[in-house]
Image (spheres, helix red, strand yellow):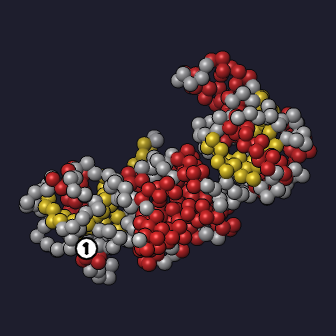
Amino acid sequence: MDYVIKKQGESRSFPEGEGFLEGASSEGDIVLHLGTQFEPDAGKTAVLVELEMECLGVHTGEHAGIEGSNALGFARYRNGDDAPSNLIELVRQPATDDSAIAAARAIFEAAGFEVAVSADQVGRIIDRLVRPKYNAALTFLDEGLATADDMDMTCRLGLGYADGPIERLEQGGLAHHFDVTKALFEVYGTPAYAPGRRATVAKQRRSAE
Amino acid sequence: MSTNIQKVGVCGAGGTMGAGIAIVASRAGFETACFDTSMEVLDRARSQTEGFFGKSVDRGKMATTDRDAALARLSASTDMGALADCDLVIEAVFEDLGVKRELLGALDGICKPEALFASNTSTLSITEIAAGCDRQDRVVGMHFCLPAQLMKLIEMSPGVNTSDEAFADAWAWTEAAGQQPVATQDKPGFILNALLVPFNNDAIRAVEAGVASPTDIDKAIKVGLNYKMGPLELLDLVGLDTQMLLCEAFYPVTLDPRASAPPLLRRMVAAGHLGRKTGRGFYTYDDNAMFGG
């Protein structure tokens, strides 16, 4: 299925040189907006807008929990400044067309990505689940439960993770973790999402630069 | 790393974890006395151990002579007196504070005064367990990961009254046994479960909130974070009833809302949807094949 890319500025999902960009056509039934504003088009099978931390509803509007159309949000998961993963989080609304979801899934999977469908929630799937765990690890570090190396080693050896929480935070950037958790905390309001002390310090230092 | 420990006792050696710990000890060259309350479970564990070592030989990981020597170092008894001359006794009995305290109290009257006691608890306080005996200075936390015979990691934690010398001796033994110890504090869940139990609860709450299906959640976590298993697959594997027990052990101590049992977990356990062991959890299982939930 042909897809059209409308791109302005930087895309976190598909940096310059990505094969997915080169696979786009000049015309098609699916439109992807990268790094730019959403433009509805009811004549298309699916219209996708690349999301950062915001909800799809910011672009489409919402109405009484029955919103939905051919519009979808998406983001390729990245841990801060790390290279993008192979996962596309595809964001739907309650009444999103099934045909739009199927079409969007098809173009991503044809390009070799794996797709997980998420409701239109801040943090989607991964950040919603993993950021509280990273916050807990930062708290444990401050409280002296274990060293950073021991916490990371425990997760690698005990859980089979590729990396531990502290090294992953250091790699992706603590300031980025602050930005993500701040956005989550503003919406969910639960202490588990409140930016941790070390992330706050990192953000303050970056802001002072 | 050298150690003065020569003989190790394992309490609860008829169970999965205890049998694995006994394998670790005997494989590393230590005389290993296996204790449990039933000879039947000890015999079954012995048979499983012989099978495990046999596979190790078949795969070229162990010489036949080493297998025979490791098996010869294993003894089994339902008489706690068989642990009298152990230098280190590791308990891996039912995860209940009263049971563990009572056990340490009994061991205290049998074992030599200088013997170390170690608890394999994953959730209980080492200090509270140690309070069951009169050698609190010689009790340490030694949490193996399941399956112990394959996983190198051991979370090591001292209780409030544990002496530095005892902790160092226990640490040295884990290294001599070929394991990888990490130091942590006597807090609920130590490192591993303190991170994992609330994370798994968050995944359950995400299902309940309609954020995504179990399949999509697990896929996102595996592909996006490069984990080997998704949280809901893992929960089905360990059992949702086990997750309930962990929540019930953690939450009253920590009062962390993330550690409290999610309503969906309670409903699934009440409905008998415990995971793989009942054929249905977040996924359904038929002849060990997994289908999307």
- Looking at the image, how many numbered discs can be counted on the residues? 1
Q: Which residue is mark 1?
A: A68
The amino acid type found where label 1 is placed reads: Gly
* Location of residue A53 in the rendering, given as x and y in whole percent from the top left corner: 35, 70
| Left or right for A128, reference A45 | right
The chain identifier of the residue carrying mark 1 reads A
* Location of residue B4 in the rendering, given as x and y in whole percent from the top left corner: 80, 34
| Left or right for B174, reference A92 | right
* Location of residue A131 in the rendering, given as x and y in whole percent from the top left corner: 47, 64
- For residue A7, say whether it is visible: yes
Give me the residue at 73% from left, 50% from top: B141
The residue lying furthest to the top in this view is B65
Neighbourhood count class around disc 1 (C-alpha, 10 Å): few under 14, some 14–19, many 20 upward: some
Give me the residue at 24% from left, 77% from top: A60
Give me the residue at 15% from left, 53% from top: A22
Most foreground residue, B275 or A141: A141
The residue lying furthest to the left in this view is A27
The residue lying furthest to the bottom in this view is A64
Which SS class for mark 1? loop
Question: Where B277 falls versus A14 (above or below)?
Answer: above
* Location of residue B160 in the rendering, given as x and y in whole percent from the top left corner: 79, 58
**Quadrant in which the C terminus of chain A appears:** bottom left
- For residue A46, say whether it is visible: no
**Quadrant in which the N terminus of chain A appears:** bottom left
Most foreground residue, B280 or B137: B137
Question: Where B152 falls versus A29 (above or below)?
Answer: above
Give me the residue at 69% from left, 60% from top: B187
- Quadrant of res B33: top right
| Left or right for A112, reference A156 | left
